[in-house]
Amino acid sequence: MNATRLLAATATLFALAVPQFASAKQQTVELNVPTMDCATCPITIKAALSKVPGVSKVKVSYEKREAVIVYDDAKANVADLKKATEDVGYPAMLKTSR
């Protein structure tokens, strides 16, 4: 393959990849987790949420019975976050979206 064709092929591949990255946004959501009943519950919930691909930050409050999660919406969604808490025994409900 000559240099011109290689350059054109590289440019085409780059152009196809860029929109995928450009459309991803960081989202922040708050989940109510009303079944937290001890001080160690937030540790379990935070660990589960942190394992979800795309999650970059998790803050869990036992006092407020909530989790605040920052995630990449190209890699995860609210259903993924809720499933992560449910899978460790703590059903959650969407509180707000920012």
Image (cartoon, helix red, strand yellow):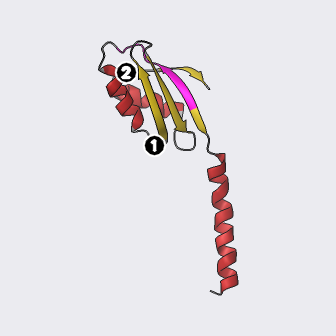
Q: Which residues are magenta?
A: 28-36
Residue 97 found in image quarter = top right
- Residue 75 appears at what percent x and percent y? 52, 44
Residue 36 in which image quadrant: top left
Q: Is residue 27 left or right of residue 86?
A: right
Q: Is residue 66 magenta?
A: no
**Residue visible at 62% across and 51% down in the picture:** 21
Which mark sits nearer the N-terminus, 2 or 1? 1
- Secondary structure under the numbered disc 2 in the rendered image: loop
Please give the residue where the numbered disc 1 appears in the rendered image: 53
Q: Residue 11: percent from the left, percent from the top?
A: 68, 70
Q: Position of residue 37 (x, y in %)?
A: 32, 12
Q: Residue at x 40, y 27 (%)?
A: 85
In the rendered structure, the answer to whether residue 37 lies left or right of residue 26 reads left
- Numbered circles on residues, count: 2
User: Who is closer to the viewer here, 23 or 83?
Assistant: 23
Residue position marked by numbered label 2 in the rendering? 90
Residue 34 rendering spot, x and y as whole percentages? 42, 13
Query: Disc 1 on helix, strand or loop?
Result: loop
- Crowding at dot 1, Cα within 10 Å, few <14 / some 14-19 / many 20+, comes out as some
Amino acid type shown at disc 1: Pro
Left or right for 95, reference 63: right
Quarter that holds the C terminus = top right
